[in-house]
Image: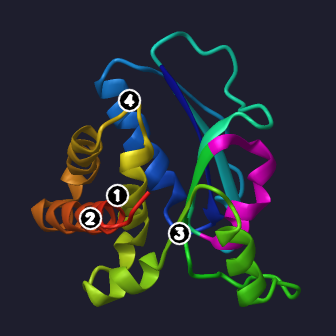
Amino acid sequence: MKTDIILSGVGGQGILSIATIIGEAALHLGLNLKQAEVHGMSQRGGDVQSNLRLSEAPIASDLIPLGMADMIISLEPMEALRYLPYLSKDGWIITSATPFKNIPNYPEDEKLKAELHAQPHVVVLDVENLAKENHMPKSANVILLGAAAPFLKILNADVLRESVGRIFASKGEEVVQMNYKAFDIGHEYVKQLKF
């Protein structure tokens, strides 16, 4: 069994934290893991992308070939669409609905929504508003991870949630509990959807 994930977004949104949580969960289960270099992190507001490959068998390359990604997890809707050529025909897009308009020719909201909803397997949720409504503005990325959890066949949601606790443990129990709640919000949101 294997899972190839493209993580995308904008610098400062928490893509690296999502990669760290998934990677820690995979290693905790004894899975093989390869991660391509995370691009764009040095520039806040610049595009960020990473390839994350998990497998029970050894992994030859850290780069996901075109048409082979099982999932795109994106904190920015246009960035999710940017990596469509890498998504397999049965792959899922799990993305935030909230645009981060950091370029002058950013697509119109309605056009962006239409293109996302035209994809066969997509979950679009407003993680930014969910985070604000629940008084956890810095946990939008963990809400998105919770929403992606049911689609990560190689890792179950409980294993991912436990990883959230281990990753944030050094920041104190309050931060751990807030991120558990964030994960649960995303997870429950997706469980209510009909697929």
Question: Which quarter of the figure has residue 155?
Answer: top left
Label 3 secondary element: loop
Check whether the beta carbons of the residues at disc 1 and disc 2 lie within 8 A of each other: yes
Question: Which quarter of the figure has residue 106?
Answer: bottom right
Kind of residue indicated by mark 4: Ala
| Residue 29 image offset from top left, x and y in percent | 30, 23
Label 4 secondary element: helix
| Residue 154 image offset from top left, x and y in percent | 40, 30
> What mark, if any, has residue 146 been given in the picture?
1
Kind of residue indicated by mark 2: Glu
- Distance between mark 4 and mark 1 Cα atoms: 16 Å
For disc 3, the marked residue is 13
**Above or below, 71 relative to 47:** above
Q: Residue at x 29, y 26 (%)?
A: 28
Query: Badge 2 local density, few (<14 within 10 Å), some, or many (20+)?
Result: some
Type of secondary structure dominating the magenta stretch: helix
For disc 4, the marked residue is 26
